[in-house]
Image: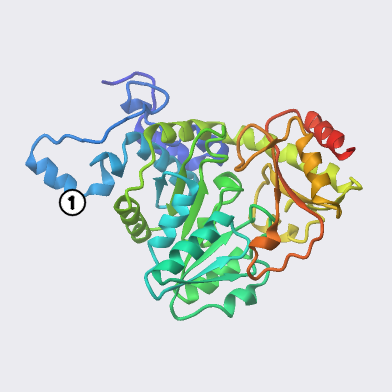
């Protein structure tokens, strides 16, 4: 059925290629011309997929990753999201998984076997570290952690069996920025696959593959979906070999995101630019306010000029988001927790990237293996949501008076 007035697929592709990222967000992952003019891709739910005859079945079995084959391999809803993310990540293809952590674990498992070695930044998301220690070690993979601010810490740990360097930049607790260009050059020289968790910046503010990273990982649970009601991961790769290896691992492990989750992430993608701008500006305003608060020892926000990682942040990133941390001047845990409990707008909870502001006390020293953490005050991580920023500052100000 033809629908008059809609651009064709070739015209759509050309338009996507020539537009800025903010405009791409409204164009990618959509083929209304093929869906009766319907604006958003529909939700396809399925396990079984039927074939007209044995010839079609055999054809599908030899090309499982490039068509609708079986529910676990993806549906048109899944593919719409994957195509959209691959476009804005400037990657070859994207693989959707059931959570951010599953996207990390699947990526690591795709390239590691017994006897191999993996290097991971010491400041990564703690579940990544737990997976490496509890699962990779269990199956005979040796894991070392390196200081993300010390390239020599990485160089000295590279071995003949090193297969992966895993980065998170900035880290989602203490916000160190890694020298990504130097790390990818080093990895390429040693034939090591590089991976980077890009959940903080999203592809809107940083494109890892453009900087030589092989595998870019997103917890779409966070900013991509944007409403704290979806669990989803996304893996974008730069070539077909990486894609086939990771996709094989995902389907073999039985990991498959639901079509509703993919649909919600695709819908969230459309408003990513406007949401991130509010997160960005609000977080910077609060970070500057905290810098001048006499109860705060240090603010860990990479986009602040006083931050020691500011030059590196400015080199790689085109914007900042709503997540950062600050360190209180030394005081009792009881007093700090009383202050947290008194907050009205900042809610206590894990994750981030939704519309609601969050706060969480964290203790980096417990989790560190290599990178030193000598701060005496308690670190509080906050996510600045979509509320009025003056209201959020008033909430913090009232709590600080206790």
Give the residue at the far right of this rendering.
294
**Quadrant in the picture for residue 169:** bottom right
Tell me, yes or no, if residue 112 can be seen here: yes
How did the renderer colour the structure? Answer: rainbow
Q: Is residue 209 left or right of residue 53?
A: right
Give the residue at the far top of this rendering.
4
**Quadrant in the picture for residue 116:** bottom left
Q: Nearer the viewer, residue 118 or 53?
A: 118
Q: Position of residue 302 (x, y in %)?
A: 72, 53
Q: Nearer the viewer, residue 327 or 40?
A: 327
Q: Nearer the viewer, residue 236 or 293?
A: 293
Give the residue at the far left of this rendering.
54
Q: Nearer the viewer, residue 386 or 270?
A: 386
Tell me, yes or no, if residue 300 can be seen here: no
Q: Position of residue 287 (x, y in %)?
A: 79, 44
Quadrant occupied by the N terminus? top left
Label 1 crowding class (10 Å Cα cut-off): few <14, some 14-19, many 20+?
few
Q: Is residue 5 left or right of residue 265?
A: left
| Image position of 283 with respect to 377: above or below | above
Q: Residue at x 36, y 56 (%)?
A: 246
Q: Residue at x 13, y 43 (%)?
A: 57
| Image position of 108 with respect to 188: above or below | above
How many numbered markers are drawn?
Answer: 1
| Image position of 293 with respect to 167: above or below | above
Q: Position of residue 322 (x, y in %)?
A: 68, 41
Q: Residue at x 34, y 26 (%)?
A: 33
Q: Secondary structure at mark 1?
A: loop
Q: Position of residue 7 (x, y in %)?
A: 39, 27
Q: Residue at x 42, y 38 (%)?
A: 81
Quadrant occupied by the C terminus? top right
> Which residue in the protein does label 1 denote?
62
């Amino acid at each position: 059925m033809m629908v008059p007035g809609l651009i064709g697929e070739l015209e759509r592709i050309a338009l996507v290629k020539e537009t800025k990222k903010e405009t791409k967000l409204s164009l990618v992952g959509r083929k209304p011309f093929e869906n009766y003019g319907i604006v958003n891709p529909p939700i396809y739910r399925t396990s079984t997929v039927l074939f007209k005859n044995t010839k079609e079945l055999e054809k599908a079995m030899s090309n499982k990753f490039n068509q609708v084959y079986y529910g676990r391999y993806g549906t048109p809803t899944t593919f719409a999201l994957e195509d959209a993310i691959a476009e804005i990540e400037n990657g070859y293809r994207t693989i959707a998984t059931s959570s951010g952590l599953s996207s990390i674990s699947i990526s690591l498992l795709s390239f590691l076997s017994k006897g191999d070695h993996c290097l991971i930044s010491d400041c990564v998301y703690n579940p990544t570290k737990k997976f490496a220690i509890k699962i990779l070690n269990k199956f005979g993979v040796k894991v070392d952690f390196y200081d993300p601010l010390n390239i020599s810490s990485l160089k000295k740990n590279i071995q003949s069996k090193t297969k992966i360097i895993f980065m998170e930049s900035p880290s989602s607790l203490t916000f160190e920025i890694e020298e990504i260009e130097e790390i990818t050059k080093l990895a390429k020289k040693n034939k090591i696959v590089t991976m980077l968790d890009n959940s903080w910046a999203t592809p809107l503010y940083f494109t890892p593959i453009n900087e030589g990273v092989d595998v870019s990982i997103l917890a779409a649970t966070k900013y991509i979906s944007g409403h704290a009601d979806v669990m989803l991961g996304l893996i974008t790769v730069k070539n077909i070999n990486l894609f086939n290896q990771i996709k094989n691992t995902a389907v073999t492990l039985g990991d498959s995101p639901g079509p509703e989750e993919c649909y919600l992430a695709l819908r969230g993608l459309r408003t990513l630019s406007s949401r991130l701008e509010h997160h960005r500006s609000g977080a910077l305003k609060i970070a500057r306010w905290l810098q001048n608060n006499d109860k705060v020892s240090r603010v860990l926000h990479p986009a602040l000029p006083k931050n020691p990682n500011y030059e590196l942040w400015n080199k790689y990133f085109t914007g900042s988001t709503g997540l950062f941390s600050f360190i209180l001047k030394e005081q009792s845990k009881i007093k700090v927790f009383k202050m947290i409990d008194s907050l009205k707008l900042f809610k206590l909870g894990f994750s981030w990237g939704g519309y609601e502001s969050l706060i969480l006390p964290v203790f980096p020293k417990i989790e560190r293996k290599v990178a030193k953490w000598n701060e005496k005050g308690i670190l509080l991580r906050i996510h600045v949501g979509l509320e009025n920023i003056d209201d959020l500052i008033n909430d913090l100000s009232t709590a600080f008076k206790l």
